[in-house]
Image (tube, grey):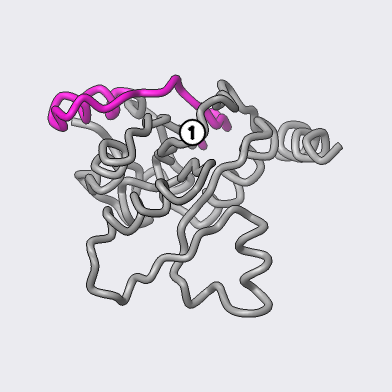
Amino acid sequence: MKRKIYQFLFTTIFGWKVEGSISPEIKKCIVIAVPHTSWWDFVIGVFARGIIHVEINFLAKKELFVFPFNYFFKWMGGAPLNRGKKENKVEAIVKIFLEREIFRLAIAPEGTRKKVEEWRTGFYYMALKANAPIIPGVFDYGNKKVIFHKPFYPTGNITEDLKILHSYYSGVLGKFPEKSFHPK
């Protein structure tokens, strides 16, 4: 029932559609959400996740996980991250992957909603160390589509792998086109 409500609101009211999915058999993965230009991306992602009916998680600073909000953030799939502690964030997130049976992490490789020329590479190394595929997720505001592409398994050759991953985002516009990532 909830899935039908998400679909009705997302497609009929807002005029968006979802293409592709994430196989429920993939229990652990990194879903890269690009382009990330607005806080609305989170809302769009929640609707898309509800439509494909697969749990997708996110990270947030641990300070948000205090009563009573901790229940809401955990229910939404959130995992707390200690951003103030001087520890390797990639290792800390890989630890979360290893501790959980199911962890599909949505992350924006741009690392910000501002215009960037290059992605941060932490997501790539998380996928390698957690032995998890990367699912290219596209937020195409120009065509009002969220696209989940097939899993990509990193090879360890980051230069070549990023070329492949960048190819999924050529010509894609975010909510604020001037902030959109444009692959070279």
Report the magenta residues as a range. 140-167
Q: Is residue 5 left or right of residue 10?
A: right
The quarter of the picture where the C terminus appears is: top left
Q: Assess whether residue 168 is covered by the magenta stretch.
A: no
**Residue 180 rendering spot, x and y as whole percentages:** 35, 43
Give the crowd class for mark 1: few <14, some 14-19, many >=20 residues within 10 Å.
some
- Amino acid bearing label 1: Asp
Find residue 139 and report its horizontal and vertical position in percent: 49, 37
Give 42 or 176, whichever is nearer the viewer: 42
Picture mark count: 1
Residue plotted at (44% across, 37% down): 31
The residue nearer to you, when weighing 102 against 17, is: 102
- Which residue sits at x=38%, y=47%? 108
Quarter of the image for the N terminus: give it: top right
Q: Residue at x 30, y 44 (%)?
A: 126
* Residue at mark 1: 140
Question: Taking 3 as reference, is 20 above or below it?
Answer: above
